[in-house]
């Protein structure tokens, strides 16, 4: 699965506290190499995909062919 980030995603990402951005970066690396890792809680919810970055942060994505677009 290929991952893309929308401009909306990047605006929200830049608004996060530095520690959360660093955690999100680490979780993205884990998502690329081990998407089934339990700490990610990477799952499909309806027509969207969700992944956890810490206890209080999630990223959402929509499917597009064989990829997902994070927004």
Image (cartoon, helix red, strand yellow):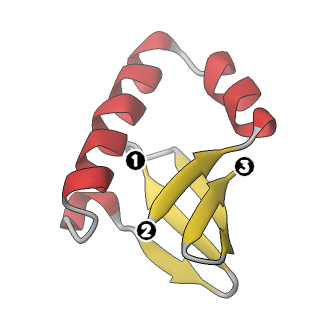
Of pointers 1 and 3, the one earlier in the residue sequence = 1
Marks 1 and 2, how far apart at CA: 25 Å
Q: Gap in Å between the C-alphas at discs 1 and 3?
A: 19 Å
Indicate the position of residue 61 as horizontal and vertical percent values. Answer: 64, 61
Please give the name of the residue rendered at 24% of the width and 71% of the height, measured from the top-left corner: 36
Query: Circle 3 — which element?
Result: loop
Is disc 2 surrounded by few (<14), some (14 to 19) or many (20+) residues within 10 Å? Answer: few
Q: Note whether 40 is above or below 64 in the view shown.
A: above
* Quadrant in the rendering for residue 33: bottom left
Query: Which image quarter holds the N terminus?
Result: bottom left
Q: Name the residue that disc number 1 marks.
A: 55
Query: Residue at label 3?
Result: 71
Tag 2 near tag 3, CB within 8 Å: no
Q: Nearer the viewer, mark 1 or mark 3?
A: 3
Q: Residue furthest bottom?
A: 46
Q: Residue at x 70, y 84 (%)?
A: 47
- Residue 35, image x, y percentages: 28, 64
Q: Nearer the viewer, mark 1 or mark 2?
A: 2
The residue that label 2 is drawn on is 1
Mark 2 or mark 3: which comes first in sequence? 2
Name the spot of residue 67 as percent of width and height, x first: 56, 67
Q: Residues within 10 Å of mark 3 (few under 14, many from 20)?
A: some
The residue furthest top is 18
Task: Give coordinates of residue 29: x percent, y percent.
Answer: 28, 41
């Amino acid at each position: 699965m290929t991952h893309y980030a929308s401009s909306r995603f990047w605006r929200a990402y830049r608004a996060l506290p530095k520690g959360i951005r660093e955690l999100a970066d680490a979780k993205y690396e884990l998502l690329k190499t081990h998407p089934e890792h339990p700490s990610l809680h990477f799952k499909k919810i309806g027509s969207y995909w969700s992944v956890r970055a810490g206890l209080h942060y999630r990223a959402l994505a929509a499917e597009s062919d064989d990829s997902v677009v994070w927004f």
